[in-house]
Image: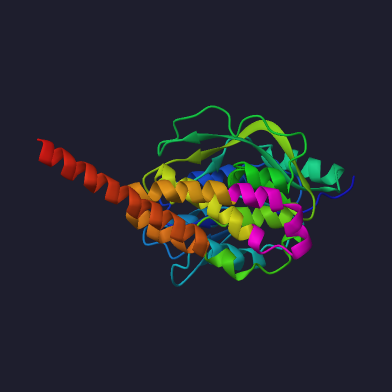
């Protein structure tokens, strides 16, 4: 029987004291028959996360913990953790998520074993609350038979806890902007999809928690939209000229959507507008600010007119 390839499971965690034990136990319960290592990188949690990881690791030597001496954010924590993962296959599960099928890794590794042209395999998932009660149905919904970079750029794409990739697809250094965006997943999956396509397994294998302490959950709908669009535009800006030309139409569509969202934010959330205004071109920024001033002027004229008529 041919020996199975090793798998590294990368667990990024920050203040996940309530959830980390369930996360690690769901990974340790996997039935994968090959080598398995579980690399936990704690981004300087201020609660008891590290203590709980150490307690679980004492019962399972496959689990190792690295605690950063200061909080650096998801991107820097990921880049550091990635260097510690040397197995041919790499899976992810953030510290507040967990898996519900013990054959998750086996299913995904089987696909990569059989399909050399496939660089990424992902599954369905469900969202749950802090107590694990399911909040949604199967996600992310209908998927293409072969998922490519264009699909990632134009849609939501896979969720981190459902993904397995070839470790070799992430050997190149990340660009500077990777460490500046709030949601670096697009860069990670985008880099992998530049080396090959993805395949989808239509099985629910994990629960993505939505809770008050979640970095994504705490954002407004407008900011989530700006984050998705802005990160995709940032990723496209790092591609070589020839590759960028391939996705020129996609980039144009994303830019229009981003400017439209920023136009709405200019009227509803000034702080949010300022936060993301650096991603606008000078021409788009001038246009939005001019239109906002014009609208404010018209509003004041209407108010003054109504006051005089009253």
Question: Residue at the spot x=56%, y=55% of the render?
Answer: 231
Question: Which quadrant: the N terminus?
Answer: top right
Is residue 257 or residue 27 the one in the foreground? 257
Horizontal side of residue 226 vs 247, given as left or right: left
Q: Is 2 left, or right, of 256 in this rendering?
A: right
Q: Position of residue 173 (x, y in %)?
A: 68, 69
| In front of the other: 158 or 258 | 258
The residue under the point 16% across, 38% down is 306
In what quadrant of the picture does the C terminus appear?
top left
In this view, 104 is above or below 289: above
User: Picture coordinates of residue 276 (x, y %)?
Assistant: 45, 58
Q: Position of residue 196 (x, y in %)?
A: 80, 51
Q: Which residue is drawn at the image coordinates 79% and 61% (left, top)?
A: 242
Is 170 covered by the magenta stretch? no
> Is residue 238 highlighted in magenta?
yes
Magenta span main SS: helix
Q: Which residues are magenta?
A: 236-254
The structure residue drawn at horizontal position 57% and vertical position 52%, both measured from the top left corner, is 255
The image position of residue 94, as x and y in percent, is 53, 50
């Amino acid at each position: 029987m041919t020996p199975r390839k090793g798998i590294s499971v990368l667990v990024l965690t920050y203040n996940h004291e309530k959830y980390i034990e369930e996360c690690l136990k769901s990974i340790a319960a996997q039935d994968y028959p090959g080598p398995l290592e579980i690399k936990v990188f704690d981004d300087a949690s201020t609660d008891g996360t590290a203590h709980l990881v150490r307690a679980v690791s004492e019962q399972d030597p496959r689990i190792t913990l690295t605690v950063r001496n200061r909080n650096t954010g998801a991107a820097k924590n990921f880049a550091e953790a990635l260097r510690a993962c040397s197995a041919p296959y790499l899976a992810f599960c953030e510290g507040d998520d967990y898996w519900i099928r013990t054959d998750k890794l086996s299913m995904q590794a089987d696909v990569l074993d059989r399909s050399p042209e496939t660089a990424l395999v992902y599954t369905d998932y469900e969202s749950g609350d802090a107590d694990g009660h399911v909040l949604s149905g199967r996600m992310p919904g209908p998927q293409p038979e072969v998922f490519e970079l264009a699909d990632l750029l134009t849609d939501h794409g896979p969720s981190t806890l459902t993904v397995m990739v070839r470790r070799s697809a992430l050997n190149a250094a990340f660009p500077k902007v990777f460490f500046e965006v709030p949601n670096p997943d697009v860069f990670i999956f985008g880099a992998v999809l530049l080396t090959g396509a993805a395949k989808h397994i239509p099985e629910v294998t994990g629960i993505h928690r939505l809770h008050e302490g979640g970095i994504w959950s705490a954002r407004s709908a407008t900011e989530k939209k700006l984050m998705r669009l802005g990160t995709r535009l940032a990723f496209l800006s790092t591609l070589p000229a020839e590759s960028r030309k391939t996705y020129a139409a996609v980039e144009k569509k994303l830019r229009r959507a981003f400017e439209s969202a920023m136009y709405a934010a200019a009227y509803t959330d000034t702080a949010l507008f300022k936060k993301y205004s650096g991603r606008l071109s000078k021409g788009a920024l001038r246009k939005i600010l001019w239109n906002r001033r014009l609208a404010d002027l018209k509003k004041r004229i209407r108010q003054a007119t109504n006051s005089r008529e009253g």
